[in-house]
Image (cartoon, rainbow, N blue to C red):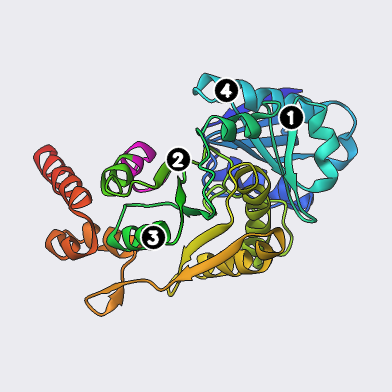
Amino acid sequence: MEIEYAYPPKGRQLEQVKTFLGELGLGWDEGVQFTVNLTENGCILASGSRQYNVLKCIGVAADRQGEGLTASIVTELVKDALSRGFSHCFLFTKPQNIPRFEGFGFWRIAETADAALLENHKNGVTAFVDALGPVDTGEQRGAVVAHCNPFTRGHLYLIEEAARRCSSLDLFILSEEGAAFPYEVRMELVRQGTAHLANVQVHPTGAYLISSVTFPEYFIQDRDRVPEIHAELDITIFARYFAKPRLISRRFIGTEPYSRLTAAYNQGLHTLLPPRGIEVIEIPRIEAGGAAISASRVRDLLRQGRLEEIHPLVPNSTYEYLEQMVSQNHNKG
């Protein structure tokens, strides 16, 4: 048996991996950065991949089950993740596969009927939330979860409205990388833009509140249900590990006129949070130039070099950062 590595697979090798996974009823996730295959006589017996610290696209040939190949794949993926600075790894899988991966040093975070999330740090999610800081014991504690890619006046309006309706507000910024703006930049722009709001605490999400960017689809047969399945797992984690210990009773969201995925997620919030004792409050988006302000609109204008048109859409701190970024890129060119 041989081990082959790819960073990531391309061309014929990629097609072989896709074919192998397809024969197992699994798909391929774009965004993979590393793949390891166990092969014999040129045939793939087992395969697994990694995107940042998320392990995915793991499969073993049906006639080679029970030979420890999954353990070998997971070991190689974790070893590669460690070499890239990721000591804390996560794994999405079908619920029926949970016991298998628990045997490889992973612990269950949450599961639904369709998907489960595990991590290789025992009680990692509990420790993460405990470290977020003290909890205000006011009567109405609220939360906003946002990507802020980048931070816009639309985000600011939502946060200000939420803060006005709460004794204190937890503002969670998605920590994942891979977005147009790095996490550290997004977090700093949010901190600067909300510094005037005394009852707002800004927090990272770690890897626990799941973006649709990193949520895998490879084990989901009905791709049309991916947004629904993603939303249910993410909302389950939010309610159990974030809202409950931090006494959050309200979650604020903005209306979504553009993104089908975000609109589906918002519907999931309306359906799943109230039975858990969390009110969902949807705030209409503010507009500029006759259209709702969105981060995607800002990114489009930035790609087109129309910096001045961005000014009404973002707070001053964001605009100053974008000016500096454009200037630096121009000087490099």
Residue under label 4: 87
Q: Is residue 177 visible?
A: no
Q: Is residue 37 magenta?
A: no
Image mark for residue 164? 3
Q: CA distance from mark 2 to mark 4?
A: 21 Å
Q: Which-is-in-front pick, marks 3 and 1? A: 3
* Tag 2 and tag 4, C-beta contact below 8 Å: no
Mark 3 and mark 2: span between their CA atoms? 19 Å
Badge 4 density bin: few <14, some 14–19, many ≥20, Cα 10 Å: some
What kind of residue is marked 2?
Answer: His
Residue 166 in the image: state x and y as whole percent.
Answer: 46, 57
Residue under the point 87% across and 42% down:
62
Residue at numbered disc 1: 106
Amino acid carrying label 1: it is Phe
Task: Tell me if residue 327 comes above or below residue 316 in the rendering.
Answer: above
Helix, strand or loop for disc 1: loop
Dot 1, crowdedness within 10 Å: few (<14), some or many (≥20)? many
Kind of element beneath mark 4:
loop
- Residue at (66%, 23%) from the top-left corner? 76
Q: Earlier in the sequence, mark 4 or mark 3?
A: 4
Is the C terminus in the top left, top right, bottom left or bottom right quadrant?
Answer: top left
Residue span colored magenta: 179-187
Which of label 3 and label 2 is nearer to you?
3
